Amino acid sequence: HPVIEMRDITIAFGGVRALDGVGLRLFPGEVHALMGENGAGKSTLIKALTGVYSIDSGSILIDGEEHTFSTPAAAQGAGISTVYQEVNLVPNLTVAENMLLGREPRKLGRIDVRAMNRRAQETLDRLGLDISPTSVLGEHPIAVQQLVAIARAVDVEARVLILDEPTSSLDADEVEKLFEVMRSLRDHGVAIVFVSHFLDQIYEISDRMTILRNGTLVGERMVAETTQLELVKLMIGRELEVLER
Ligand code: ADP
Ligand code: MG
Ligand code: MG
């Protein structure tokens, strides 16, 4: 059965509906792509799940039981870890401190620094990332900071990992490293939600997808059974125009 099921979710901002009757079923051990054009409602649906936004109507089931998170910390406490497209880290802290903050937000200040650094090093090693845990985060390029945000999300031992456009600032090698980690987590039963604008990445890593258009649900598809052309038609709601020269 799904680890998470969202049913008929509606959210409006100032009277404008960003989501209108949208659902999502997320199964353990799958990479589930959330697809749709910019503004379709992907991030809003994720934020509704993780307690950033409250829903106007609809229901959220965790392990089959109705449950709504009132804060992102509550969602994280239940094993739902999220990396947003806007990197949400503290530049003047070290890499290891940022990773700890993701796990235990109130722990800084009374922590075993050596244990903290050791654990961060282990996670970075597992990801194949050559980043010093004791280096200051803000001195790294944005792509490296994004990798630290991903390492932090992986570090919390989540059952559900949500990656909202995590690859936009990564190079091809970094994307491959991320995919290796995603495959390993998936094989350990973690459910992963993946948002990316790059269809090649979606087809390489995803098993199933949910497609949104203008805040509504188009449907759910198996990636292997859907061509890229069919997917684009579902996303934009019409046939592609073939331009003749
Ligand atoms: P996507 O992630 O698919 O690009 P979003 O979920 O970010 O789309 O946005 C869906 C719609 O909801 C957009 O029209 C966006 O402007 C609107 N929206 C999202 N968050 C807010 C907000 N906090 N206040 C007002 N409008 C919002
Ligand atoms: Mg967007
Ligand atoms: Mg978005």
Image: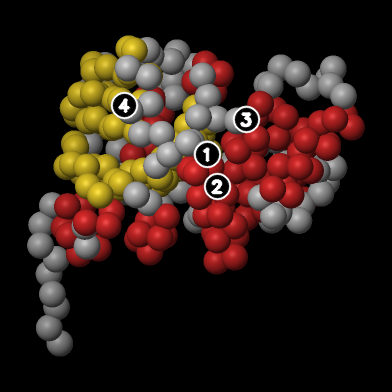
Tell me the SS state at disc 4: loop
Of callouts 4 and 1, the N-terminal one: 4
The quadrant where residue 112 appears: top right
Q: Residues within 10 Å of mark 2 (few under 14, many from 20)?
A: few
Q: CA distance from mark 2 to mark 1?
A: 6 Å
Q: Quadrant of the N terminus?
A: top left
Q: Are marks 2 and 1 in contact (CB under 8 Å)?
A: yes
Q: Amino acid at mark 2?
A: Ser
Position of 151 with respect to 175 (left or right) is right
Q: Amino acid at mark 4?
A: His
Q: Amino acid at mark 1?
A: His
Q: Are marks 4 and 1 in contact (CB under 8 Å)?
A: no
Of callouts 4 and 2, the N-terminal one: 4
Q: Which residue is mark 4?
A: 1
Q: Which residue is mark 1?
A: 188
Q: CA distance from mark 3 to mark 4?
A: 23 Å
The quadrant where residue 102 appears: top right
18 and 217: which one is in front? 217
Of callouts 3 and 2, the N-terminal one: 3
Q: CA distance from mark 3 to mark 2?
A: 15 Å
Q: Which mark is on residue 156?
A: 3
Q: Quadrant of the C terminus?
A: bottom left
The residue mark sitting in front, 3 or 4, is 4
Of callouts 1 and 3, the N-terminal one: 3
Q: Which residue is mark 2?
A: 184
65 and 71: which one is in front? 65
Count of numbered circles in the view? 4
Of callouts 3 and 4, the N-terminal one: 4
